[in-house]
Amino acid sequence: MTEPFDADEQQDLCGVRCVHKERIASARSIALPAGEYEAMAALFKAMGDPNRLRILWALGHGEMCVCDLAAHLESSESAVSHQLRLLRQLALVSNRRQGQVLYYRLNDDHVHTLIHMALEHIRE
Amino acid sequence: MTEPFDADEQQDLCGVRCVHKERIASARSIALPAGEYEAMAALFKAMGDPNRLRILWALGHGEMCVCDLAAHLESSESAVSHQLRLLRQLALVSNRRQGQVLYYRLNDDHVHTLIHMALEHIRE
DNA sequence: TGAAAGTATGAATATATGTTCATATATTAA
DNA sequence: TTAATATATGAACATATATTCATACTTTCA
């Protein structure tokens, strides 16, 4: 499945030119359900912002409240709150209330792993 | 460093209200250089699109040319080419030419790992 | 050398995204 | 209950992004 395909295999498919028919069939056979690409894209998109990464990185070392995060990011609390909502909706973070204060934390270890993989990649 | 902070610690810092001073200092001490958040964000952003994920997933199981990918995604070759350029610029994929055909492949294993972590997360 | 195939790229447009501002909600203290 | 603090949220605006269209580049073959 990993070998290069010979250009002689080229055929037409659905009006699109230059196609290695078997390679496409193979790609189709291992493809994920459409919804999983969507869900993963939403997850990566959520991590695709420097400010949200700062938040996630900071939370990776301990919980923080909205004000702390706003001060740390030198951003407005409203902006941070909007970011946190996004991260919450994607189950990247969760919070606990203590009085008036909401403490946010990372939701699971996947986030940690994702960030560390990304770091390895960009540091190469 | 991971314990909840008491709200009594609250102080002002730079005109921002409600701050746990020590927690912010701690966050600052472990923060990454700004450029690394930017670079990671660019990486995650690149993976934050369903079509690009389809491409990466397909390439994860063997190299493909632009035409193959366009057929597989049922998208135009131009659109796919634009996507591939982005992925190339971020070193997620690379290509080799064989005659007129450019075969694309994943650049390293980080991409695989990133996608599988994301899958684990969304499947929970 | 010219033509065709495969791919790349710039510009333009439509959509998505992030921040700000104003306002609403929730909790505590007076 | 009222005021104050901490946070959430909707709308609006500015910027970013993805696709399309037209065109350019590169390789092969006649």
Image (cartoon, coloured by chain):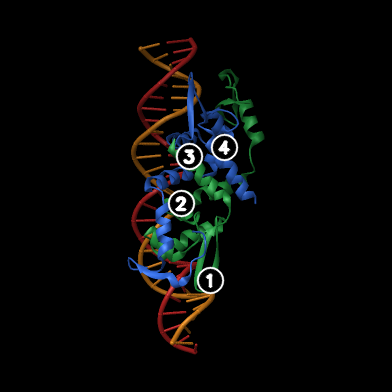
Chain colours: A green, B blue, C orange, D red
Q: Is residue A78 visible?
A: no
Query: Is B11 above or below relative to D18?
Result: below
Please provide percent x and percent y for residue A6.
58, 19
Residue that badge 3 annotates = A120
Query: Is A87 above or below relative to B57?
Result: below
The label nearer to you, 2 versus 3, is: 3
Q: Which amino acid is tagged 4?
A: His
Residue that badge 4 annotates = B112
Query: Dot 4: what SS?
Result: helix
Q: Within 10 Å of the Cα at label 1, are there few (<14), some (14-19), or many (20+) other Cα atoms?
A: few
Q: Which amino acid is tagged 1?
A: Gln
Do pointers 1 and 2 mark residues of a single chain? yes
Residue that badge 1 annotates = A98
Query: Is B1 above or below relative to B61?
Result: below
Task: Give the chain letter at badge 1.
Answer: A
Residue that badge 2 annotates = A53
Which residue is at a point 56% across and 32% down the rendered structure image? Answer: B59
Q: Which amino acid is tagged 3?
A: Glu
Label 2 vs label 4: CA separation? 20 Å
Task: Give the chain letter at badge 3.
Answer: A
Do pointers 2 and 4 mark residues of a single chain? no
Label 4 vs label 3: CA separation? 13 Å
Q: Is residue B97 visible?
A: yes
Task: Give the chain letter at badge 2.
Answer: A
Query: Dot 2: what SS?
Result: helix
Query: Dot 3: what SS?
Result: helix
Query: Dot 1: what SS?
Result: strand
Q: Which amino acid is tagged 2?
A: Leu
Label 2 vs label 3: CA separation? 15 Å
Q: Is A22 left or right of A83, judged from the image as shown?
A: right
Task: Give the chain letter at badge 4.
Answer: B
First of labels 2, 3 by sequence position? 2
